[in-house]
Amino acid sequence: MFTITNGGFGSSFAQNPFSQAGDRGLSAYDRRQRLVLTYIWDVPYVHSTDNVGFRVLNAITSHWQWSGFATFESGRPDDIISGSDTLGDGRATNDRPNVVNPNLPAGDFARYSKALKGFAGDLGRNTYIGPNEQYWDTSIQRVIPFGIHHLESQALTVRAEFYDALNHANHDLPVLNLANGPSTVNGDGHFGDLGSTIHGQRQIKIYLKYSF
């Protein structure tokens, strides 16, 4: 069973159904390196309540918590396709090209050429590795206990969550269809174009929760 690759525009079919060995390669979910850091920090606060000043500082600085996680991972693999039905099986999304200059980087258009009609390309499956990705998600919250007789078990929680807090741009996979021609300008939609990003920009959510 194949997972559709090439940014969702690829094929779940083998390049050549009579030569399954030609489609041995990396899984679409292959991530060679992945590091996730998780943290929770109860922010230090003023404990003393000896006088009015300390009591005010205690009320302001207590019950804060900072938490979140950071994810760093290598890029995901994908197929480079010719964009034309060279094998004659009626599909133009499962035909890969030939490698004519292996000294060039994987994302260079000049590295490949379309296979001859009726032949499968010699490029392996999922040989292109996309850009590395990193995500910084964090949150800060304050629990405000009521501290009133008969209401000691009740509290109000204010929480702010920041997704992609650093607003770091994670590039999506580039266009990997050779039929589009080489990219010359960012966003032109041609081969190698890295014009799109994953998950958009920073998002902030604010919650208010009443516990009783």
Image (cartoon, rainbow, N blue to C red):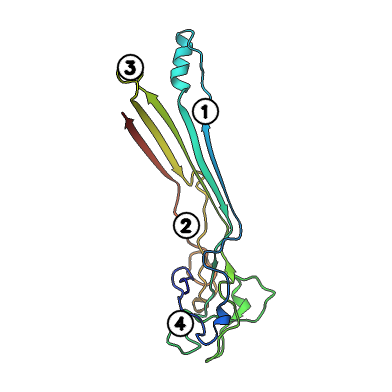
The residue carrying pointer 4 sits among few (fewer than 14), some (14 to 19) or many (20 or more) residues within 10 Å by Cα, namely some
Amino acid type indicated by mark 4 = Ala
> Looking at the picture, how far across and down is residue 81, in whole percent?
52, 77
The residue carrying pointer 1 sits among few (fewer than 14), some (14 to 19) or many (20 or more) residues within 10 Å by Cα, namely few
- Is label 2 or label 3 in front? 3
Say which element carries label 4.
loop
Pointer 1 or 4: first along the chain: 1
Q: Residue lying at the far bottom in this picture: please name it.
A: 118
Amino acid type indicated by mark 2 = Ile
- Which residue is tagged 4? 92
Residue visible at 51% across and 18% down? 46
| Number of the label disc, if any, that sits on residue 148 | 3
User: Marks 2 and 3: CB-CB under 8 Å?
Assistant: no
As measured in the structure, the alpha-carbon distance from the residue carrying label 4 to the one carrying label 3 is 71 Å
Drawn side of residue 105 relative to residue 126, left or right: right
| Number of the label disc, if any, that sits on residue 198 | 2
Amino acid type indicated by mark 1 = Val
User: Marks 4 and 3: CB-CB under 8 Å?
Assistant: no
- Is label 4 or label 3 in front? 3
- Is label 1 or label 2 in front? 1
- Which residue is tagged 1? 43
